[in-house]
Image: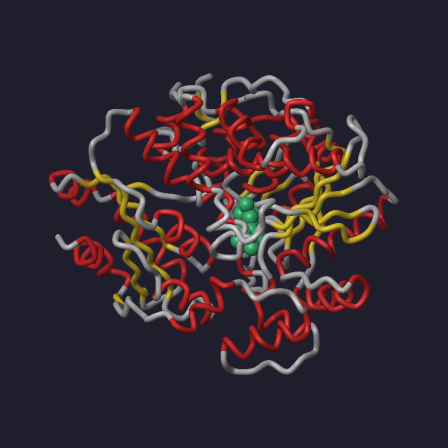
Amino acid sequence: MKYFSTRGGARVEASEAIVKGLAPDGGLFVPESFPDRISFSELKGKTYQERAALILSAFLSDFSGDEVKMCVSNAYTDEKFDDKAIAPLHKLCDQLHILELWHGPTCAFKDMALQILPHLLTVSMRKQGKKEEIVILVATSGDTGKAALEGFKDVDGTRILVFYPEKGVSSIQRLQMVTQEGNNVGVAAVNGNFDHAQNGVKAIFTDAEFNAFLKQNGIALSSANSINWGRLVPQIVYYMSAWASLIEQGEIREGEAINIVVPTGNFGNILAAYYAGKLGLPIGRLICASNANDVLCDFVRTGVYDRMRTFHTTISPSMDILISSNLERFLFDITDGDTEQIKGYMSMLSKDGKYKVDASTLKKIQSILWAGTCDDGMTKDTIYRIAKKYDYIADPHTAVALCVYEQYVLETGDNRKTILASTASPYKFNDSVLSALQCDIPDDDFMRLSALHAESKMKIPNSLWDLKNKKERFHDVCMPNAMQDMVKKLLGL
Ligand SMILES: *Cc1c(COP(=O)(O)O)cnc(C)c1O
């Protein structure tokens, strides 16, 4: 199976799509045809790792079975995940099952893909005959940087450098990054906001002279961002696996359609759920939950994608986004691969800041997706209500999804069984969660972890509690225009 670009160019193997990340014409890589459907009987009785190997193999057709197995067994280990199920289900009530995607080393769902991406990437580099050392450059607003550091830590043939905005991450997120262990990692703060850091990284990627200099030193830059096919395909696994587990547990019948709710930012996680549907998971509705940054909700309701709007900083920061890159893959699919149309939409988006899909496309979108939004006040209210009603503490991102799901049920009366993706541990966003629960909020990070433990009785993740005893290794701060020099410094060039 080959991959081509949503904008019509390229025709490459999976390994090349993973090495390149973005297609040369600016589009995203998509499979030219979908693998055969995977049935429940193929997943039945299998472990998460076995299911992952089966599903990844269906997409990564130039990987051998052993290569896929090696990637999977390096990624989803008991040492890295604090639950044997890897992505366990929590039954909130008869109708609603929470799929917890935050049992990995950084307590957020990015681990599900970033634990395996480094292995997929090194195998892909070898297949593509590339000899350079890969240096992953990441600009992060918090979750991605730490998850990428943990994923690439001590993976042979790779190094990873992360830039974070000096004042733009929470104190626990900063601690997670500056104490990062590993022999191939580097972290620096940028004196500016996330956009400064991101623009700085983009400038480094597109600087031909600098890239030539790196090549002379045996180094190739790469990115780990969520448009890479190697990040998307591992996310299909947990939806398929959760579906199979619900059938095994007798919660649903084989063939019974279920709804899936996803707290959405860049549209990667919900797209993976849609792809799981194409792979055989019977989906009723996909419910797309946004915070106050409601660009996707407006799109699903009106057919107009308009990024020209105020950017809101919210208590669910990993969903604060105005351009949801992976939507391009969804549009490609529902227009039956109409690359001219996709090119048109994307050029309007960059020129005018918006585009509008035609009436029949909108109708199709609405038959698949339902969308809603939830602001910070509603998010906190939801955390409080769910805690009181079900004795379950949700993080703010998960609470956005819970709130939008309640709106969906109220509006449609659809009582189908539902899986809701929970994307972060409440401990990771402990100040917002404590505030929502109307508790006192201690100044100190670790006292907040203890306070939340007293309230929730949930185990404090070791990876957060152990930060207490870790040494701060990285102290560098640079101006946005000096990031290139920082890269040289961190690489010892
Ligand atoms: C990244 C992230 C999201 C958004 O996921 P997308 O794939 O970008 O839509 C939601 N919640 C958390 C905690 C995240 O880290």
145 displayed left or right of 257:
left
Across and down, in percent, residue 23 comes to 38, 30
- Asked if 247 appears above or below 353 in the picture, the reply is above
Q: Quadrant of residue 365?
A: top right
Q: Is residue 319 visible?
A: no
**Quarter of the figure with residue 183:** bottom left
**In the rendered view, how is the structure colored?**
secondary structure
In the foreground, 257 or 157: 157
Question: Residue 208: x percent and y percent?
Answer: 19, 40
Residue plotted at (56% across, 62% down): 312
Tell me what residue is drawn at x 41 percent, y 64 percent: 176
Q: Residue at x 71, y 65 (%)?
A: 383
In x, y percent, where is residue 36? 60, 17
Front residue of 280 and 296: 280
Figure quadrant of residue 490:
bottom left
Q: Is residue 294 shown above or below 351?
A: below
Is 358 left, or right, of 343 in this rendering? right
Identified at 57% across, 42% down, the residue is 269
Q: Position of residue 290 (x, y in %)?
A: 64, 52
One can see residue 349 in this view? yes
